[in-house]
Amino acid sequence: MNTRNEARRRPDANRVEDRVAKSVEQALGRWGGASRRDFLKASGLFVFGLTTVGAAAGRQGSEDASWPDPDFLQLDSWLVVHEDGRVTFYVGKTDGGQGVGTATQQMMCDELDVAFDQATVVMGRTDRTVDQGGSGGSDAIERDAMVGRRIAAEGRRVLLEMASERLDAPVEELAVRDGVVSLRRDPSRTVTYGELIGGRRFDVALTGANVNQTTGVASVKPVQDLKLVGQSIPRYDIPAKVDGSFEWAVDVRLPGMVHARNVRPPFAGATLTDVDESSVRDLPGFLRLVRKGNYLAVVCEREEQAIEAAERLVTTWDKPTAAPFPASDDLFDFMRSAEWAPPTDGRMAGETHGDPDGALANAATVVEAGYDVPFQGHTAIGPAHALADPSDGQLTIYTNDMKPYSHRTGIAEFLGMPPEKVRVIWMEGPQLYGRTAADDAGFEAAYLAREMGRPVRVQWMRHEETAWDTKGPAFAIDMRGGLDRDGNVVALDYRGRIANYAHVGYNQARTVLIAQLMGLRPERPSPGGARGPDDMYHVPNRREETSAVRLPLAFETPLRTGNLRDPNGPQTTFANESFVDELAVAAGADPVEFRLRLLRAATEDDEAFRRARSIAVVEAAAEAYGWDARPSPGPVGSGSVLTGRGIAYAYRQRTTVAVIADVEVNRDTGRVWVRRMVCAHDCGLVINPDGLENTVQGNLLHGISRTLYEEVRFDGEKVTSVDWRSHPTLTHRDSPEQIEVVVVNGDPNPDRPDLRPYGAGEPSHRPVPAAIANAIHDATGVRMRRLPLRPERVLEALAE
Amino acid sequence: MNEITLRVNGETHSLDVDPSTPLLYVLRNDLGLRGPRFGCGVAQCGTCTVLMDGRAVRSCILPVSRSTGEIRTLEGLPEDGELHPVQQAWIAEQAPQCGFCQNGQILTAAALLDSNPNPTDEEIRDGMDRVLCRCMTYYRIQAAVRRTANAMAGRETDERGAAAVSGREDDR
C-alpha cells in the first residue's frame, strides 16, 4: 500500500509503525479489489495458514513513534492513487457488518470514475483515516459517505485538469471511464489516473468548517449519472469471512503478548477487601494480579491459563449497605412510583401542542394504557476484547470499538498520555450496535499493557459480557388518548419514564467500567438522552413528556446504560404504535386506514417530506402484504394455533418505515411465531439494494428477538441473566419463513437529481415490537403490553 | 512434557500443552487458525465450531486430549482449491453481516448436508437451531443451506429463489 508516509521513505520492519501497518493493511486491503467472480475463480489461492500481525515483525523497534491526526482539509488524507491506477479511499467510519464500506466504495468510485474493483477502502484507523467519528446513528451513508462523494468528485476534477494539460485539450473535451481519461474526438489518445498522479501527492486543499462539511470546488454528479450506486455489488468483506482468512480484532497476535481476564464484583456495588494471591500464584503461566480499587485482573502467559486463574482466584468482597436496584420483577412498579423528574436536558424536555387535558376531558371516548419494556442487553455474539501494544513509548490498541477516535482520546486521558502517542486500529468484530461505542476492553488492555510493559490481550467471558455489558434502558410508558364521536383522534398524551441514569457515553475516561471500578467517576451520573415516539400523525392536542428514573446505584452497576441499536425507538414506538392500534380498536377502524387518516389529517410537510413518505410506506406495506381492510381483532379461531396480522409505522431521522407482522400464537404452549414480515422502507437514494435488504432483514429479526425473548433479569443485588439460557435470543427455529422488503421512494419528486440517501441501520428495528403485539391482539383479542412476550407471559395473558 | 498430537486440516501437529486445554485455544493460539472463535466458552452459541470426523463439535469445551479425530476448521473446508459448496452458497446469498458467528453456521450446515443432502425447511431449522447469530442473519443462512442442497443435487437456484420458501402458497 502506497500511502503518503511510505512514499517518502522505505518501510522498516524494526519501526513499530511499519511493523504493524504492513500486515494489518494487508489484512484490511486484501479483498478490496476482488470481485466475487474473481474470488470464485481464484478461491484456491486464498486458503491461508498461520499469518499474524507479529509474524512480520522481527524485533521490537526502539524509535519513539507518534501519530498526528490526518488533516481533513487535505485531499491526500482521503484519497491515494497508486502508480498502477489502483485507488485507496481512507474513511473515518467503521462497519458493523451492514456493508457501509462497500457502499461507501461504490459512491466514491462513482464520483471518481473508477471501477469498483480498482479501489480499496481503509476504515477507522486513527493514524490513517480522518476523524469522522466512527459509527453511530446510522449516519455513515446519510452524512459521511456524502462527504466521500464530494472528496472523490474533487479528485476527479483535479485529475481531469492534469489530463487536460497532458492531452492538450480542454476538460470539456475529455471523457473518463475506469480511471482512463480519453479525448472524446480521438479516443485513442488516453492517459490513466495512475500515469497522472500515481504514488504522488495531490497537495490540494479542501474547505469546510468541520469534517462533515469538507468539500472541494467540484460538484457531485446528479443521481441519474451514477452507475455503481444502485447496484447490488457483493460486499468486499464476505469472501474472507466465509473462507476463514479474514483477520478480526480477536486474531491479532504480537510477540511477547500475554493474556488477561477480569475478575468482576459478584454483587453490584461490592467493595473488594481482600485478594488471596496464593490461590493462583503456583498455577502454570501465572504472571501477575493487577488491582486498583475494585478493578481486578489476572495476567497469564496463555489464554486458558488466564481463564483458569480468574476462576480460581479467591477474593473477598463487601456487599453495599443499600440495595443497588429493585429486582427485575419489581422494576416497573419502582419506576412508576419514582418522583416525576422533569428532565433538565433539553433533548428530554418534551413538547405540548394544543390543550391535551381539555381535549381529553371533552372526548367522547378516552383510552388509557401502560406499556413496559425491560432493560435489554447488547449480548454481542463475541464478548468484549482488545489487544494493546505499549512498545516504544506509545500505545496501539487493536479493537472493534465502533468509535476509534473517542477510544483514542478517552484512553489517552485515562492514562494521562498525549493523544498523539495513542493509536487505535479498528478491526472488525462481533456486531457493534452501540456496545462498542464505549469499549471497556480497550481501556483495560491499555491499562494492563502499561502495567505489564508488554502487549496484553483482554477477552471478556460470556457471563461477564451478558451481565456487565451496557444495557438498553427500561421504559415504563403511560398513554392516554381521546376520540370524538366519529372516531377521530382529538388528543394524545405520552408520559414516558426511562431508567437511563447511568449512561456511559462514548469512550469517556471516567465512565468506562474500569474507570468506575477504580473509583474515577464524573460528579453526577448522566441521564443520557431520551425522546418520545417519532411519527407524522396529525393530532390537534398532543403532549410528550419523559422523566428519567434513577436507580439507587448509579456507578459500578451492571445496569449502566449505553446506546443499543435505535436507543429509545423500539421502546417508545412499542407504546405509541400499540396505543394507536388500541385507539383504532376503540374507533372500530381498520388499523391501516386509521393510520392513513392520522397522516392525512394535515397537509403541510417538512423539508424531508416525511409526511408524504410516511403515507407512502404505510400504503406500500399494506399493498405488498395484501391487506384486506377490517377492524382488529379478526375472528378468533378455535384450534391450538391462532393467526393474526399487525402493522406499525414510524420514522427515524429522515427514514420512514412500516412493518406488518403475521403471527401464529399457540394457545397451548404460549409460543409466538412471526411467520412472515413485510417491511416498506424509504431511505431515499439506495446505494446497494441487496446490502439494504440484508440490513433491514437483520433489523427485523433483531426486533423479533427483543420483542419475544430478551430481558435483563436481576435480583436485588446482581444480574442473573448471564448466558444464552438465562438471556435467550431468537434462533433459527423461530425465525420467519418469509420476509419481504419493499423499497419505497415516496419523495414528491422521486427523480430529483439531488436525491439523498438516508440511514438504514436502525429505522426498521423500531416498529417491530408494536407490529408483533398488534398481530397477537388481532389473533387472540388479547393486548400484550409488557415485553418480552415469552410463552409464560402469553399463556398468562390468554388465561385472563 | 505433555505431548499432544492433533490432526488438523490434513496436517499432524505435536504440541506440548496441558491435556485439559480446550481445543479452541490451541487451534487459535498455537496453530494460528482464525475460523473458530470464542463466543461463550460453554457450548451454547456455536461460534467455536469445528468438524471432528465430519461431525460439528464445539471446540470451546472439548479438551485437546479428547480431540483425537480428524479435525477440519473453516480454513480446511475447501477441497482441491475450490470453496466448499456451502461456502460458495454463503457468498452467493451474501449471508453474513458482521460474520463473527458464520464459522459455526457454515460448518454446522456442511455437517448437516453431509448427513442429509436434501433437508426440508423444518430439518434445516432444527439442524441449525443451536448456532446463534446476533446480527440475525438466519433468514439468509437458511436460504444458503437450501441453495447448497440445490447445487449439490445439480438443481438450479434462481437469483433470489433460495430465499423463497416452498409450500408457502397453501396457507394464504
Image (cartoon, rainbow, N blue to C red):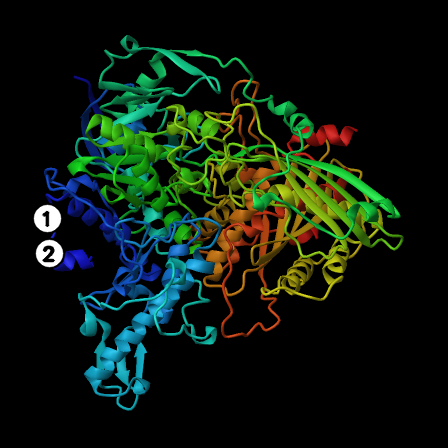
Tell me: A684 left or right of B107. Answer: right
In the depicted structure, whether residue A241 falls above or below residue A119: above
Query: Nearest the camera: A781 or A450?
Result: A450
Q: Secondary structure at mark 1?
A: loop
Q: Quadrant of residue B37?
A: top left
User: In the image, which is nearer the foreground, mark 1 or mark 2?
Assistant: 2
Dot 1: within a 10 Å radius of its alpha carbon, few (fewer than 14), some, or many (20 or more) residues? some
Chain assignment, label 2:
A
The picture places residue A123, in percent across and down from the top left corner, at 32, 52
Tell me: A629 left or right of A362. Answer: left
At 27% from the left edge and 60% from the top edge, which residue is drawn? A77
Q: Which residue position holds label 1?
A: A12
Q: Name the amino acid, label 1.
A: Asp
Query: Nearest the camera: A728 or B114?
Result: A728
Query: Nearest the camera: A165 or A723?
Result: A165
Q: Do residues under tags 1 and 2 come within 8 Å of each other at their CB atoms?
A: yes
The picture places residue B103, in percent across and down from the top left corner, at 37, 40
Q: Is residue B34 visible?
A: no
The image's mark for residue A9 is: 2
